[in-house]
Amino acid sequence: MRHWGLGRYFAAFILSVLLCWGAFAQTAATESQILDVRIASAPERSRIVFDLSAEVGYSTFPIDEPDRLVVEFSVNGLAELAPTTVEGSGLLSKMSVGMIDDGLARAVIFLNEPVQIADINLLAAEGNQPARLVIELEPGTREVFDAAVDAIKQQRQAEAAQPQPETVPVTPKVANGNSTRPLIIIDPGHGGIDMGAEGVNGEFEKNIVLQVAKRLQAELVALDRFDVALTRDGDAFLTLNERVQLARDNQANLFISLHADSFDQPEVRGGSVYTRDENATDVLDKVLAENENQADLVAGFSPPEVDNAVVDILVDLMRRETRRQSYVAAQQVVRQLSGRVPMRPHPLRQADFFVLQAPEVPSVLIELGFLSNRADLNNLSQAEWQQKVAHTLSLGIAKYFDVSVQP
């Protein structure tokens, strides 16, 4: 079996970045799409084919923990029928494809073992065939794969050390600019390349929770008591760290994260409201939290890190006032939801969700239901039901501010 040395293996990743960067800039503003994605696997070889509407810029690089290969494209989007997830076999376990920024798509390929690029070609359109990027993979060695990952990390560290132009901090759009009002930040989970759960009808969690978030925002604005912002108001990807940091930077008075998960037992259904606790209420809560905390991996980002200083603050503060306020908020929301929409037994629950870890911002995560349950999925897909839930949530949130003493 042929194995590459570090130089050739590393070049397969780095040269695609360097040589294609100009193409990124040239094609980002043009109308371009990923039309289709497919994988063909044999025990010792895998081929990945991306059908493209035009020849576009691309780059590739490896990442670890877990082992993945990332392919980025300068395109405006995915075609309507293009798959967002593709199951693999052999060298590859699966692939997620989606947008991570304007003009930038990413395919994240999860690997069953270290690989090396045997061949990579960008082919022009010919006859009835569209333009294509074809990547041939074969087994590699752990040593060479890890060395390539380390080289990428060193390059990024060197780039980060360079002086950066000043940028305006990203802040969410506030519906009412009166800064004397409490600020509520609503966080629709997932987005972009991170689809979240998928229902049997093809509905994605990221779209459902965004629809509910916009309805909830409108309900809260109509009360004329709050400033209300969304972490995302479109199909955008944000890391878990970015979601938390938006709440902290904007000194939010309440952070609401919306989700609609799935579980391998389809009979499980109903809503629930979570506050953060290192000890999950039960096994299902632990599974849900672990899945959500790894959402960044789907988009090719490293898992969130919490340094010791933050952990110390969490232990000191969240067990006191912030944790108390989070619990009061969750309690008021549960009281409004109960009897109006299907709920899990004992719907006020705890789990170690990373997105709830802002030490100074009361935060709750609301599971609207399970896309793996047909009755829940039917409700979640209906505009009338979404509106009912949004109205009910707004009543619980308003009640929280009535009974809670805000700093």
Image: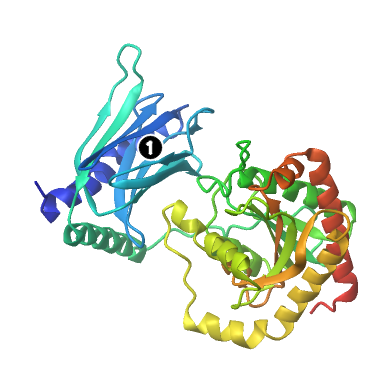
Whether residue 360 is visible to the viewer of this picture, yes or no, is yes
Helix, strand or loop status at disc 1 = helix
Left or right: residue 357 versus residue 377 is: left
Residue 98 in percent (x, y) is at 48, 41
Q: Quadrant of residue 20?
A: top left
The x, y position of residue 296, in whole percent, is 48, 57
Report the amino acid beneath label 1. Answer: Ala
- Relative to residue 306, is residue 347 drawn left or right? right
Q: How is the image coloured?
A: rainbow
When asked about the image quadrant of residue 357, the answer is bottom right
- Residue at 42% x, 29% y: name it: 36
Position in image of residue 59 (x %, y %): 31, 43
**How many marks are shown on the rendered structure?**
1
Q: Residue furthest top?
A: 127
For the residue carrying disc 1, how many other residues have a C-alpha within 10 Å: few (<14), some (14-19), or many (20+)?
some
Residue at x 51% of width, y 84% of height:
309
Q: Report whether residue 177 is seen.
A: no
In the image shown, does 91 or 333 lie closer to the viewer? Answer: 91
Question: Which residue does the image show at 54% across and 82% down from the upper left?
Answer: 311
Between 404 and 388, the residue placed more toward the observer is: 388
Return the residue at label 1.
25
